[in-house]
Image (cartoon, rainbow, N blue to C red):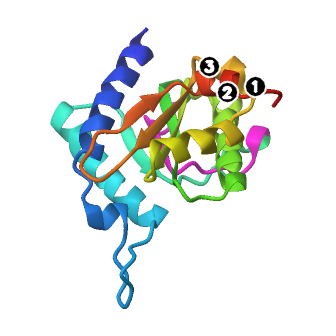
């Protein structure tokens, strides 16, 4: 119950944080080109910054860490290897204080990279004592976003319907939206 409440508070902090991400961090301008490009690291670093501001402002009792390598971790490594999600929300050093593992991808990420991130998240749910996991995709249109999800998420993942969450950040300075990936998977035939 406490972790569900904490997760809901985290979602509100996330919504506020994403509403503060500006255009240059969402799509990176490139010298000599009229087209800006998606760069996951640029987006993640700004998201990290905005989330940390939200944690401090709200006195959120967790720590935010980026790409913590689990290589050699005495509990996690033997179970899932050296996985490292883009972000984790936890209390360092206390396994029962893990809250959420997060993977981030731009809308134009390769399908195999989306699937790899999902495997990492499921590993954190099943073997690393994280009660929640989240995939956050940013950019593109809703139609493209839904199409990507229908190809990445599979019916065998339905057992994680209460612990795996999907969010889409449509555009700079807009709040991230939660999506029901279960409904999208069920709409997809014969996967």
Residue at position x 74%, y 31% in the image: 154
Residue at position x 34%, y 76% in the image: 29
In the depicted structure, whether residue 106 falls above or below residue 188: below
- Main secondary-structure element of the magenta-colored stretch: loop
Which residue in the protein does label 2 denote? 185
Q: Earlier in the sequence, mark 1 or mark 3?
A: 1
The part of the image, by quadrant, that contains residue 176 is top left
In the depicted structure, whether residue 160 falls above or below residue 24: above
Residue 168 image point, x, y percent: 44, 40
Query: Secondary structure under badge 1?
Result: helix
Q: Residue 155 — which label? A: 1
The part of the image, by quadrant, that contains residue 41 is bottom left
Residue at position x 32%, y 37% in the image: 14
Residue 62 drawn in magenta: no
Q: Residue 55 — which label? A: none
Mark nearest the camera among 3 and 2 is 2
Determine the residue located farthest toward the left in the rendered image.
57
Tell me the magenta residue range.
Answer: 79-94
Query: Secondary structure under badge 3?
Result: loop
| Classed neighbour count for the residue bearing mark 2: other residues with Cα under 10 Å, few (<14), some (14–19), many (≥20) | many
State yes or no: discs 1 and 2 in contact (Cβ < 8 Å): yes
């Amino acid at each position: 119950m406490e972790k569900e409440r904490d997760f809901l508070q985290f979602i509100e902090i996330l919504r506020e944080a994403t509403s503060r991400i500006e255009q240059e961090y969402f799509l990176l301008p490139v010298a000599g080109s009229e087209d800006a490009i998606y760069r996951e690291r640029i987006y993640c670093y700004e998201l990290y910054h905005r989330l940390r501001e939200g944690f401090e402002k709200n006195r959120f009792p967790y720590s935010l860490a980026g790409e913590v390598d689990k290589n050699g971790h005495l509990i996690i490594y033997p179970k899932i290897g050296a996985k490292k999600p883009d972000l984790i929300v936890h209390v360092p050093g206390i396994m029962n204080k893990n809250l959420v593992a997060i993977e981030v991808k731009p809308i134009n990420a390769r399908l195999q990279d989306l699937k790899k991130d999902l495997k990492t998240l499921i590993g954190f749910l099943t073997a690393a004592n994280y009660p929640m996991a989240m995939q956050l995709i940013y950019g593109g249109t809703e139609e493209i976003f839904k199409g990507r999800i229908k190809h990445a998420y599979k019916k065998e993942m339905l057992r994680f319907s209460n612990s795996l969450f999907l969010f889409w950040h449509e555009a700079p300075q807009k709040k991230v939206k939660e999506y029901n990936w279960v409904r999208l998977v069920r709409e997809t035939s014969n996967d």
